[in-house]
Image (tube, grey):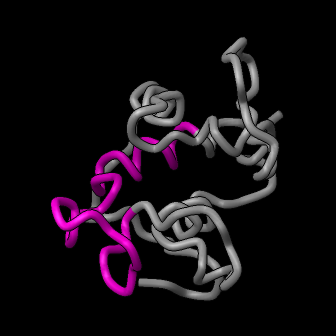
Amino acid sequence: MVAGDAIAAPLDGLAGDPARGEAVVRNRETANCLICHAIPGTAEPFMGDVGPPLAGVGSRLSPGQVRLRLVDPTRVNPGAIMPAYHRTEGLRRVDPRYRGEPVLSAQEVEDVVAYLAGLKE
């Protein structure tokens, strides 16, 4: 449930794992966070700068705020270019094979939240 600019409760009551979350963030085949964001402490090539750097995101945003931005960033910024990673309705130009399926599962969202919430510096 969205309250303000956050989803306070973990999706499906799941606990996230930061190590799995880091793997999701670095995976160029699924979430592809690296295409838009720089990730701290990594020598990943070709990191993007369209989105804000993820260094210190855990100091700037609460886990609930991170969660909402992953689930549906347009709830915070209607003009967001970041994709909705867990919304399935109201999307345009979705390959028919993937309609009704989120980009990230609830567990993957919670894993990414756990990882990003730990990036304090």
Q: Is residue 112 left or right of residue 100?
A: right
Total number of numbered discs in the rendering:
0
Instruction: Find the magenta span and give its range.
Output: 86-115
Question: Residue most toward the left?
Answer: 97
Q: Is residue 67 left or right of residue 103?
A: right
The percent coordinates of residue 71 (x first, y second) are 46, 67
Residue drawn at 61 percent across, 42 percent down: 116
53 magenta-colored = no
The percent coordinates of residue 60 (x first, y second) are 80, 55
In this rendering, is residue 39 above or below 74? above
Quadrant the N terminus occupies: bottom left
In this rendering, is residue 105 above or below 120? below
91 magenta-colored = yes
Q: Is residue 44 left or right of residue 16?
A: right
Residue drawn at 45 percent across, 25 percent down: 19
Residue drawn at 16 percent across, 60 percent down: 97
The percent coordinates of residue 10 (x first, y second) are 39, 62
Q: Is residue 10 left or right of residue 65?
A: left
In this rendering, is residue 83 above or below 22? below
Along the line of sight, which residue is nearer the eye, 55 or 28? 28
The percent coordinates of residue 121 (x first, y second) are 83, 33
Along the line of sight, which residue is nearer the eye, 76 or 102? 102
Which picture quadrant has residue 21?
top left
Which picture quadrant has residue 37?
top right
